[in-house]
Image: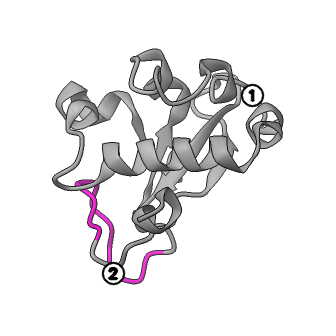
Amino acid sequence: MTAASDTTAAQLESWVPVVNGSDFPIQNLPFGVFVHAGRPPRIGVAIGQMVLDCAAVARAGFLDDCCEPGLVQAARLNALLAAGRPAWLRLRERLSRLLREGGDSRLRDAGAEHFLIPQASV
């Protein structure tokens, strides 16, 4: 199974609460830029009613063997987009594994409140 199909498999479930019919289930982790609490813009992905702060995830070391930290610690998507599809797929696969029920539990164990921000506050 390729990384792309593995991240979109219908049976995947996230430990982050996601209501049925959400535009942002674990199978759809859209990259975007957000601002929160007056801090500089940064890259995140939507999951349910939350935004996963990719810069915080990278700072915690969860992306070290997946991608260059600068790709997600920027205020714009330019470097990430320029890195190309293979980089996007590796990052999406890692984020999916960190967010899925029964996957890599390091993010959850480290305290989700350090990485997840309610969409309503961004």
- What residue span does the magenta drawing correspond to? 12-22
Amino acid found under the numbered disc labelled 1: Ala
Percent position of residue 48, x then y: 41, 62
Location of the N terminus by quadrant is bottom left
Q: CA distance from mark 2 to mark 1?
A: 31 Å
Location of the C terminus by quadrant is top right
Q: Main secondary structure of the magenta part?
A: loop
Q: Residue at x 53, y 33 (%)?
A: 54
Give the number of the disc on residue 20.
2
Q: Is residue 88 magenta?
A: no
Label 1 crowding class (10 Å Cα cut-off): few <14, some 14-19, many 20+? some
Percent position of residue 93, x then y: 45, 49
105 up-or-down from 58: above or below: below
Give the number of the disc on residue 75.
1
In the image, taking residue 40 as reference, residue 4 lies left or right, namely: left
Q: Residue at x 47, y 20 (%)?
A: 64
Q: Residue at x 67, y 20 (%)?
A: 70
Tell me the SS state at disc 2: loop
